[in-house]
Image: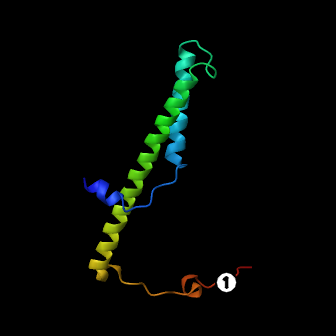
Amino acid sequence: MGFIDEAKSLPPPGIVNRNSVWLGFTGWLSAMLQNAINHRPPLKSGVHRQFLLTTIGWFIGYHITKYENYTYARLDREMNEYIKLHPEEFAPKEKKTYAEIVEPFYPVR
């Protein structure tokens, strides 16, 4: 149950996200394909089934996005904790100017 407790502290993802749109479209397309396979008019028959499969796909996509956000937040938290515990491995590099990086230019004529 650790996932549920920690995931509640994250803000919820937007209702319209890439996973929801993609899986909603996939659900609708599967209903259309089933109509076409059964020799029914793809757009006009089984509208309730099209709506149902689109809604199911949207719901699954929303929860996949929620889990994905939790996973990335957990990985970020662990990485930042490691950086705080081992600052010697992440010493700041000296800053160079652009002139120090680029070699001098000598035009050849």
Q: How is the image coloured?
A: rainbow
**Residue 1 image position (x, y, % from top left):** 25, 52
**Residue 52 image position (x, y, % from top left):** 50, 30
For the point 30% across and 73% down, the residue is 81
Q: In this rendering, would 103 be left or right of 69?
A: right
Compared to 39, does 92 lie above or below? below
For the point 70% across and 81% down, the residue is 107
> What amino acid is at disc 1?
Tyr
Compared to 51, does 17 lie above or below? below
**Residue 77 image position (x, y, % from top left):** 34, 68
For the point 58% across and 82% down, the residue is 102
Compared to 94, does 9 lie above or below? above
Q: Which residue is nearer to you in this view: 22 or 57?
A: 57
Q: Secondary structure at mark 1?
A: loop
Q: Which residue is mark 1?
A: 106
Give the residue at the far left of this rendering: 1
Q: In this rendering, would 71 be left or right of 31?
A: left
